[in-house]
Image: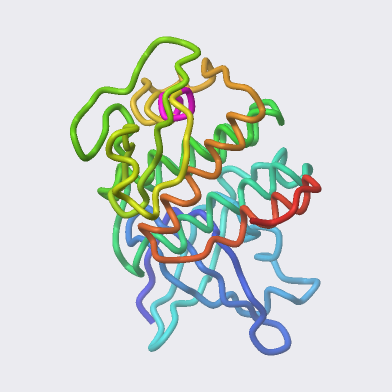
């Protein structure tokens, strides 16, 4: 069988037969693809610990009739800090779920590959309390790369700019169908609009436009963070036409009732 090399982030895997696994990979060269890891569930397998979910690895694959076969694997980044912390792992699962459900198979997106690796690196090396913001930053940047970045700097209907003064009490909203903010005048015309504070709309804009490395300067309250998380989740679910599982798992871990 012809062989080829690929750099990949392991998204997830599932059992196949008694000793194999089907592994879903997001590769730098070929986009998302599925491959078989033969004998990986045996204790003597050399592949076992090298293709765990979230791992960044260099692979040698052999082309197969239906699925390619992983022949060799070398770890580039294991992201051990993510594996050791349940909450970090849950947010990493959110990141890889967005990649898995947002991209078609064999659709090459090197920019998304680099973004996903950067986000996992931030989860691994950053503070545990920043895990949620890192994940929301990733989700918004992913949306931008795929062509559906939310518009939160102005009303998507009339163009009115979002107020910048602190403590503004105006009742703005976010429209999932239109992918952006609605001012108080336009809000009543959209039955699906969800209430969002001006501060959270501004935070969303900041995460989508701030230079790389500046996202950590965002300072919002826990209530605003929860509101921002809801906005990002609703926007991504509407655009991807899916019901995301990872946010519900995170809410259960935090002891909050699922939405």
| Quadrant of the drawing holding the C terminus | bottom right
In-front residue for pair 142/173: 173
Colour scheme of this structure image? rainbow
Asked if residue 221 lies in the magenta stretch, the reply is: no
Q: Residue at x 19, y 30 (%)?
A: 159
Q: Residue at x 60, y 52 (%)?
A: 54
Q: Position of residue 108 (x, y in %)?
A: 29, 58
| Quadrant of the drawing holding the N terminus | bottom left
Query: Which quadrant of the view contains residue 174?
Result: top left
Q: Residue at x 39, y 58 (%)?
A: 238
Indicate whether 161 appears above or below 194.
Answer: above
Indicate whether 50 appears above or below 221.
Answer: below
On the rendered structure, is 86 left or right of 222?
right
Q: Position of residue 254 (x, y in %)?
A: 77, 45
In-front residue for pair 255/92: 255
Q: Position of residue 213 (x, y in %)?
A: 46, 20
Q: Which residue reaches farthest top?
A: 165
- Count up the numbered dots: 0
Give the main secondary structure of the magenta stretch: helix
Range covered by the magenta-colored residues: 199-203
On the rendered structure, is 84 left or right of 228?
right
Query: Which quadrant of the view contains residue 227?
Result: top right
Q: Position of residue 124 (x, y in %)?
A: 65, 35
Asked if residue 202 lies in the magenta stretch, the reply is: yes
On the rendered structure, is 189 left or right of 171?
left
């Amino acid at each position: 069988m012809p062989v080829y090399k690929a750099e990949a982030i392991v998204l997830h895997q599932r059992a196949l037969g008694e000793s194999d696994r089907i592994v879903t990979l997001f590769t730098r060269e070929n986009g998302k693809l599925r491959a078989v890891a033969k004998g990986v569930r045996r204790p003597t397998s050399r592949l076992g610990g090298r293709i765990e979910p979230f791992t960044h690895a260099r692979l040698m694959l052999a082309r197969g009739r239906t699925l390619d076969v992983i022949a060799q694997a070398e770890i580039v980044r294991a992201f051990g800090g993510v594996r050791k912390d349940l909450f970090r792992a849950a947010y990493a699962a959110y990141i890889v779920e967005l990649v898995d459900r947002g991209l078609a198979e064999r659709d090459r997106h090197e920019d998304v590959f680099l973004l996903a690796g950067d986000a996992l690196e931030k989860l691994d090396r950053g503070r545990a309390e920043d895990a949620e913001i890192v994940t929301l930053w990733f989700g918004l940047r992913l949306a931008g790369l795929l062509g559906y970045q939310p518009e939160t700097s102005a009303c998507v209907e009339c163009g009115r700019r979002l107020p910048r003064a602190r403590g503004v009490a105006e009742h703005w909203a976010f429209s999932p169908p239109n992918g952006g903010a609605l001012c108080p005048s336009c809000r009543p015309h959209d039955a699906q609009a969800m209430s969002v504070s001006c501060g959270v709309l501004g935070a969303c804009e900041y995460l989508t436009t701030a230079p790389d490395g500046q996202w950590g300067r965002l300072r919002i309250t826990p209530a605003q963070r929860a509101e921002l998380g809801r906005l990002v989740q609703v926007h991504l679910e509407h655009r991807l036409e899916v019901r995301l599982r990872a946010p519900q798992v995170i809410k259960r871990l935090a002891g909050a009732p699922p939405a």
